[in-house]
Image (cartoon, rainbow, N blue to C red):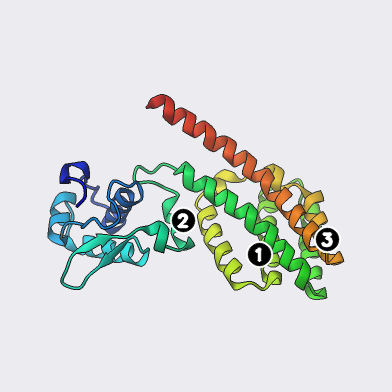
């Protein structure tokens, strides 16, 4: 390893959901930088002893780390840390949002919100370019239902999700669809906590109608602009909370 064993602070895990707990602890060591790309992990037996769990839990956790492209397992050889920023995909975002201590990683959360706004704009642009009558009718139906449910923030939250799903379907871009799936997986972990935080975004009916109007006109740039205007409402709210979290952690620290 590039660091001494004492620099990597493995701790015994609670004896429940062992593989999950091992995965989270090892993931935390890697994404925090305490274990660097190229570092070798201890052998299964050593990890089992250090973490106080059986080798089956360690083996399962290592397989998950390999699937997430955080490590590489060499047959009969050494297991090494990979540079996940160079090789991992957006499917790792959901896992990275929560650190080993169970806290939100504010850097990752900001990245997710910024990616969300950027994607929203380009998804709307492509949806405006490729919109047909069926897509426009479906989007109009969703927006009309939002108007009917405007006093129900939970219903608006679900309809907002349906709105973006329909737009990415109309955009007909597989890469954006898969990226949106990853963002939704991340979002789903906190969905119930974000309902009121994002209320202004969900309730921006004028914005949703503006996107629809731009799609009907085939105005790609205006559709992109209006879409970003909507998501940036939520982005600003979330970033304000993240800034407060950072300030609180800095004061502790």
Which residue shows up at 54% across the image and 53% down it?
A: 187
Looking at the picture, how far across and down is residue 219, in whole percent? 82, 63
Looking at the picture, how far across and down is residue 20, in whole percent? 31, 56
Residue receiving disc 1: 165
For the question of whether residue 233 can be seen, the reply is yes
* 247 sits left or right of 27 in the view: right
- On screen, residue 38 above or below 199: below
Residue receiving disc 2: 94
Residue 134's label in the rendered image is none
Q: Residue furthest top?
A: 251
Looking at the picture, how far across and down is residue 237, in whole percent? 63, 39
Q: Residue furthest right?
A: 217
* 53 sits left or right of 25 in the view: left
Q: Quarter of the image for the C terminus: give it.
A: top left
* 159 sits left or right of 240 in the view: right
- For disc 3, the neighbor class at 10 Å (few under 14, some 14 to 19, many from 20) is many
**Nearer the N terminus, badge 2 or badge 1?**
2
Q: Quadrant of the rendered structure where residue 209 is?
A: bottom right
**Nearer the N terminus, badge 3 or badge 2?**
2
Kindly report the distance in space between the C-alpha atoms of the residues bearing marks 2 and 1.
18 Å
Kindly report the distance in space between the C-alpha atoms of the residues bearing marks 3 and 1.
17 Å
**Nearer the N terminus, badge 3 or badge 1?**
1
- On screen, residue 177 above or below 54: below
Kindly report the distance in space between the C-alpha atoms of the residues bearing marks 3 and 2.
32 Å
- For marks 3 and 2, give the one nearer the viewer: 3
Tell which of 28 and 189 is nearer to you: 28
Secondary structure under badge 1?
A: helix
Given contact means CB atoms under 8 Å apart, are the residues at marks 2 and 1 in contact? no
For the question of whether residue 138 can be seen, the reply is no
Residue receiving disc 3: 214
Q: Quadrant of the rendered structure where residue 135 is?
A: bottom right
């Amino acid at each position: 390893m590039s660091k001494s064993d004492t620099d990597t602070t493995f701790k015994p895990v609670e004896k429940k959901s062992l593989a999950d707990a091992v995965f989270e602890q090892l993931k935390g060591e890697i994404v925090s930088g305490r274990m660097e790309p190229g570092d070798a992990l201890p052998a299964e037996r050593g990890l089992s002893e250090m973490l106080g769990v059986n080798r089956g839990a360690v083996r399962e956790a290592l397989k998950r780390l390999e699937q997430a492209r955080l490590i590489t397992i060499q047959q009969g050889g050494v297991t090494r840390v990979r540079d996940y920023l160079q090789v991992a995909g957006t499917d790792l975002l959901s896992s990275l949002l929560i650190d080993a201590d169970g806290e939100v990683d504010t850097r990752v959360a900001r990245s997710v919100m910024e990616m969300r706004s950027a994607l929203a704009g380009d998804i709307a642009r492509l949806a405006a370019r490729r919109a047909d009558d069926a897509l426009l009718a479906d989007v109009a139906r969703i927006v009309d239902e939002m108007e009917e449910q405007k006093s129900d923030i939970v219903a608006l939250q679900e309809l907002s999700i349906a709105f973006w799903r329909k737009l990415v379907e109309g955009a007909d871009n597989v890469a954006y669809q898969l990226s949106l799936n990853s963002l939704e997986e991340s979002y789903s972990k906190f969905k119930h906590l974000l309902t009121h935080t994002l209320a202004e975004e969900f309730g921006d009916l004028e914005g949703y109608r503006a996107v629809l109007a731009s799609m009907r006109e085939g105005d790609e740039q205006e559709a992109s602009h209006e879409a970003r205007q909507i998501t940036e409402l939520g982005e600003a709210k979330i970033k304000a909370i993240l800034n407060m979290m950072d300030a609180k952690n800095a004061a502790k620290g």
